[in-house]
Image (cartoon, helix red, strand yellow):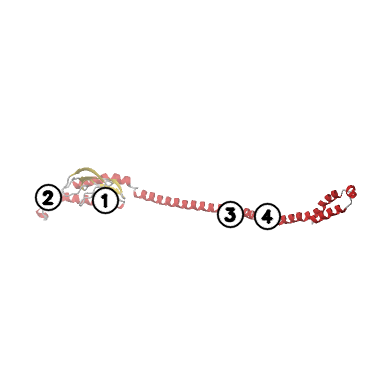
């Protein structure tokens, strides 16, 4: 369209007379009117670009609104989530404290029971320790009487000589002391105190927790480390050793 209009103006200028071109500046006017003719053609291009820019800018403006909406929703949800996490941590902490308190209380109960039982079992420990010497003296008194003085040589008391009557009195005294010792040891056993002799029977093996070795020697028919003689009997109170037994131990090798 622009070219056609230019051609028309050029042809019109050529057909004009020479004086007309001198008096009136047709070319200048034509050249000045060209922008006016071309200006209507530029308007649609500007409108086109402006119209095309609008749909390009609108989609880009929509995502920020959606992202802002999601961020606002997250901001609204975050306090609730934080509060929930805080409560969960508090619950875990309180549960841990509760379990520890229960465990401590049970341990305290068990410890208290052990202490009470120990106090009951060993309340007479000092008294029993002081009584050991009396029991030892009674045992020594019974051990000084030989067995030959206790059993009559003749079963018929009428044929016994007068000297044998004294042996009968000694046997009666021995029996009375033996009964006293038996009753005393039975009473002590009720309260947890017991006497033990490692050399009784075949002889026990040496136990450093119960026995105190005073000497070692060779003994035929015995194993190494076996107790063959007791110098002093031992005592225990409810499983606790009050006094270890003093013994002799076999050592053949």
Residue 23 vs residue 128, the one in the foreground: 23
Image mark for residue 60:
4
User: Helix or strand or loop: what does disc 4 sit on?
Assistant: helix
Residue 124 image position (x, y, % from top left): 33, 47
Alpha carbon distance from label 2 to label 1: 31 Å
Q: Earlier in the sequence, mark 3 or mark 1?
A: 3
Q: Nearer the viewer, mark 2 or mark 3?
A: 3
Q: Nearer the viewer, mark 3 or mark 1?
A: 3
> What residue did someone put label 1 on?
185
Residue 144 image position (x, y, % from top left): 18, 46
Alpha carbon distance from label 3 to label 4: 32 Å
Q: Earlier in the sequence, mark 2 or mark 1?
A: 2
Image mark for residue 20:
none
Q: Earlier in the sequence, mark 1 or mark 4?
A: 4
Residue 106 image position (x, y, % from top left): 43, 52
> What residue did someone put label 3 on?
81
Q: Rate crowding at label 3 as few (under 14), some (14 to 19) or many (20 or more) other CA atoms within 10 Å.
A: few
Residue 1 vs residue 185, the one in the foreground: 1
Residue 217 vs residue 158, the one in the foreground: 217
């Amino acid at each position: 369209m622009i070219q056609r209009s230019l051609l028309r103006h050029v042809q019109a200028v050529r057909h004009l007379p020479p004086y007309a071109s001198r008096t009136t500046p047709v070319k200048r006017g034509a050249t000045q009117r060209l922008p006016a003719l071309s200006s209507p053609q530029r308007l649609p291009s500007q409108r086109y670009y402006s119209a095309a820019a609008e749909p390009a800018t609108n989609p880009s403006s929509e995502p920020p609104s959606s992202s802002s909406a999601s961020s606002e929703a997250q901001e609204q949800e975050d306090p609730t989530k934080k509060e929930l996490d805080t409560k969960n941590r508090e619950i875990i902490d309180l549960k841990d404290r509760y379990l520890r308190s229960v465990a401590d209380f049970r341990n305290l109960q068990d410890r208290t029971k052990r202490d009470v039982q120990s106090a009951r079992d060993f309340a007479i420990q000092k008294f029993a320790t002081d009584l050991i010497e009396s029991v030892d003296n009674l045992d020594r008194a019974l051990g000084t009487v030989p067995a030959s003085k206790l059993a009559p040589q003749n079963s018929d008391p009428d044929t016994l000589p007068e000297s044998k009557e004294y042996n009968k009195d000694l046997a009666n005294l021995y029996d009375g002391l033996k009964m006293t010792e038996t009753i005393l040891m039975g009473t002590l056993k009720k309260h947890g105190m017991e006497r033990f002799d490692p050399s009784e029977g075949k002889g026990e093996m040496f136990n450093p927790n119960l026995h105190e070795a005073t000497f070692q020697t060779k003994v035929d028919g015995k194993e190494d480390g076996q107790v063959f003689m007791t110098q002093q009997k031992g005592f225990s109170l409810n499983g606790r050793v009050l006094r270890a037994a003093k013994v002799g131990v076999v050592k053949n090798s």
